[in-house]
Image (tube, rainbow, N blue to C red):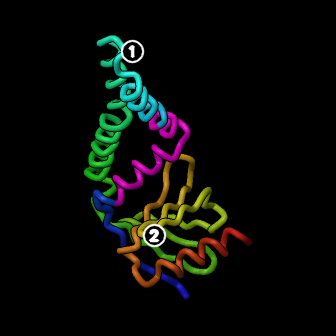
């Protein structure tokens, strides 16, 4: 059964992807671990650190827990305001593959072209390259979300 729907990208979906993509990579995980270790070190051994060392540990913790997420959210907002997201994207899924169109441009893919599918409760990311993915919020394809998920899974298994 073919499924067709439009996706007008919103700030919540794009920001969620940018944060997920960054923090699920090794660099993002290492940054989070360093921040947690810095905070734990500050709390456990506060009196052992000099003022300069405390400031450096606080800066390290803030870098990955506050500044980086804010920069990523700004980046997502800048992307959202670019021409690529001004118009909605039309998705068409069937048993053989899927087509994405926007305006007069259209591209078709087989499910095996998907590098990595990621399925969450409220969104689906179909990574076409290591750094870019199609973002499909469940709210845009409500009742067809599970159908699309199954088409992607079975199409990739062929």
Q: Is residue 144 above or below residue 40?
A: below
- To which residue does mark 1 refer? 48
Numbered badge on residue 14: none
Pointer 1 local density, CA inside 10 Å: few below 14, some 14–19, many at least 20: few
The vertical placement of 113 against 42, above or below, is below
State the extent of the magenta-drawn residues as a range. 13-32
Looking at the picture, tell me which residue is in the foreground, 154 or 113. Answer: 154
Q: Main secondary structure of the magenta part?
A: helix
Nearest to viewer (mark 1 / mark 2): 1
Task: Please provide percent x and percent y for residue 155.
Answer: 66, 73
Question: Which secondary structure lies at badge 1?
Answer: helix
Q: Is residue 77 above or below residue 64?
A: below
Classed neighbour count for the residue bearing mark 2: other residues with Cα under 10 Å, few (<14), some (14–19), many (≥20): few
Task: Identify the image quadrant of residue 66.
Answer: top left
Name the quadrant of the C terminus.
bottom right
> Circle 2 is placed at which residue position?
121
């Amino acid at each position: 059964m073919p499924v067709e729907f439009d996706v007008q990208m919103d700030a919540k979906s794009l920001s969620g992807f940018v944060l997920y993509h960054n923090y699920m990579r090794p660099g993002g995980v290492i940054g989070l671990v360093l921040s947690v270790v810095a905070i734990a070190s500050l709390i456990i051994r506060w009196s052992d650190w000099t003022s300069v060392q405390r400031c450096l540990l606080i800066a390290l913790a803030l870098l990955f827990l506050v500044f980086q997420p804010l920069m990523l959210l700004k980046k997502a907002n800048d992307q959202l305001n670019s021409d690529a997201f001004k118009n909605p994207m039309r998705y068409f899924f069937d048993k053989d593959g899927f087509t994405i169109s926007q305006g007069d441009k259209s591209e078709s893919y087989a499910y095996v072209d998907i590098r990595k599918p990621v399925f969450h409760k409220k969104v689906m990311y179909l990574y076409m390259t290591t750094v870019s993915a199609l973002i499909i919020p469940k709210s845009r394809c409500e009742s067809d979300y599970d159908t699309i998920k199954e088409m992607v899974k079975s199409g990739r298994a062929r």
